[in-house]
Image (cartoon, coloured by chain):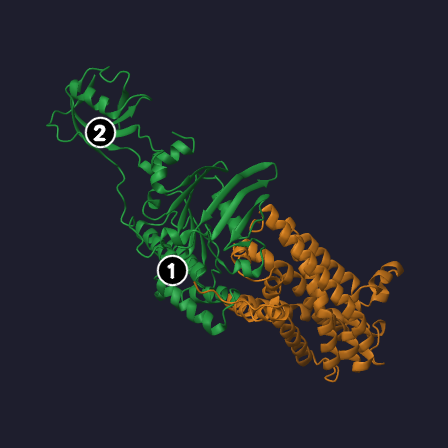
Amino acid sequence: MSTVALPTGRARGVAGELRKLPAFVRRDFLVAWSYRMSFVSDLVSMTGQIIVFYFIGKMINPDVLPTYGGTNVTYLEFAAVGIAVGVFIQFGLDRVSAAMRGEQLMGTLESVLVTPTAPSTVQLGSVAFDLVYIPIRTAVFLTAVTIVFGLNLSAAGLIPALIVLIAFMPFVWGLGVATAALLLTFKRGGGLVGLGFVAVGLLSGVYFPLDLLPGWLAAIAEANPIAHAIEAMRDSLLGQASLSSVLPTVALLIPCSVASLALGLGVFRLAVRRERRRGTLGLY
Amino acid sequence: MVSVPDRTRNDHGCMSAVTAPAFARARDGAPEAGLRALPAIEADAISQKFGPKLVLDSVSLAVAPGAIQALLGPNGAGKTTLLRILSGLLVPTSGTVRILGRAEDNSREFRSLIGLVPSGDRTFYLRITGVENLAFFARLQGATKREAKRRAGEVLDEVGLADAAKTRVGFYSHGMQKRLSVARALLMNPPILLVDEATHDLDPEGAERVRDLVVAAARRGAAVVWATQRLDEIRGLADGVTLIAQGRQVFAGSVPELMTHAVPRRYLLRLRGSMETGALDGLATLERTGQGAEHFLLVLQDDAVLGAALAALGAAGVDVLTCTEERSGIEQAFLSLAGAR
């Protein structure tokens, strides 16, 4: 009998698990590529959304919008950055939470979990493709909007914006993994994801400035890391904020991201353990 | 009065209705009994409850390296639940599992020892090809990219799917998916192979191919648990049998030992001649099978023997042309032990 020798030791074990991630990316790319039409429809819906906001923006007086870097911005500029980050969050939450559920529905979850692969690797692997695809999609979106509508986005702000995004990604991922755990346990939980989307739309300043909210709601929104991430992105891309000026936000986001990810993975591990005991891992 | 056609009697001897099938053959390479002393799979007093329902009640199992243990049982007996426990997918309510002497801990090392052929159909990514599916699972088993591709190609060849390697699994037939499932389980030549209803609803050729693959794995030293409801296939395939019914283990032993529980009471006869009703009173009942004027089903009463019933037929002037057991010995033993005559 020849079996593959598994790496021993924690570090080698982690390295061995990380080496499996490209396999997930390849699998999900091939599956996604087999549905080419979905790429096209995604592009069309993104374009449609921007056109709608372009016309809404024509009705809105830029004076009611916050200034970035001391200059007024158009509503389309304001909304484009918000939508880019908001869609990034929605995709993240939706796909991360749906990845394991998708495996359950396809009937492949048990086949994957019976392999010598850690459940957290399966979870990460199941979204690895999206972690590559979604930032690319966001960048394409912003570039297209900038070119077509002549938005005044700052090239100098790209690096600070990217750093904010990197600091922020694990926060979204953690929320998605926690939602995935709930879906794994309770099988249906789309409502929770929907609630998350509402919170993103209402309390994060994607579509309108937060100071338009009533005082108590604005106070809640102030504690929302997503709102800070979006503002930092706007500061970078619309106000040419330097790296040093977004660092306080990055410093705020990192512990939130660590806590979110740790909580998400912990809850997910508990969910898998519970389902193994109950014998309902593959049920949907 | 039972009326049967009048022709010359030509046979009074009975034979088994189910003859040993083509796959029933000795496994030349199977390890000697002495080498099988240490079990590769040990399940001790496994019980499983789902809510208040007890689905497995203190079931034990031991399988030596290179041996094939048939796990028999009717629908809902608990076979799949036991396999899921052995594979680490399910934590038993009580009892212990040891694989190659190692206690079940659901660690990656533990899972690397096991190849599972699940009973379900939808266990692959249907939108991608067979070879891509296998390469993906090989990577999860720890193979490098190059090794995964090579092994995927090799096992596809072994299971006769080389021509369909680049076809999406969604276009595979049921039998092809089953073979692909066996291929996946064999990717890394695991020392433990758990096979759940692999030949269920396969055509005879497809079923034999799957059995041959598993036999070959056993020859290489894998300990195999083969869950099935196809009673005829365990003869010549399995070294041992565990029979569970309603979650309880009702038999554990060899196939010949299982056969000792077979008490045939139902025979298919071809008769010619006529006799008075009552000739078989106290011995058996005789009824037409609906397959032709000469075909009858003889059911012996509890304390009657076949010879007496046949003698009574002869004495009544009826020629017995053929006599076969209605069910195979294994089937009779199964029904007897599972509590259904």
Question: In the rendered image, which residue does mark 2 sit on?
Answer: B269
Question: Which numbered tag is attached to residue A18?
Answer: none
Image location of residue B215, percent across then percent down: 36, 55
Chain letter matching colour orange:
A
Left or right, A27 with respect to A76, comes to left
Q: Is residue A187 visible?
A: no
How far separated are the C-alphas under marks 1 and 2? 45 Å
Quadrant of the image occupied by residue B262: top left
Viewer-nearest residue: A126 or B210: B210
Badges 1 and 2, same chain: yes
Observer-nearest residue: B34 or B186? Answer: B34
The relative height of residue A212 versus residue B120 in the rendered view (above or below) is below
Residue B239 locus on image (x, y percent): 37, 47
Q: Secondary structure at mark 1?
A: loop
What residue do we see at 41% from left, 33% from top?
A: B337
Q: Position of residue A63 (x, y in %)?
A: 85, 74
| Residue B177 visible, this orientation | yes
Q: Say which chain is green.
A: B
For the residue marked with disc 2, what is the amino acid? Leu
Please identify the quarter of the rendering in which residue A99 is found: bottom right
Circles 1 and 2: CB distance less than 8 Å?
no
Q: Of callouts 1 and 2, which one flags the residue occurring earlier in the amino acid sequence?
A: 1
Q: Which residue is mark 1?
A: B220
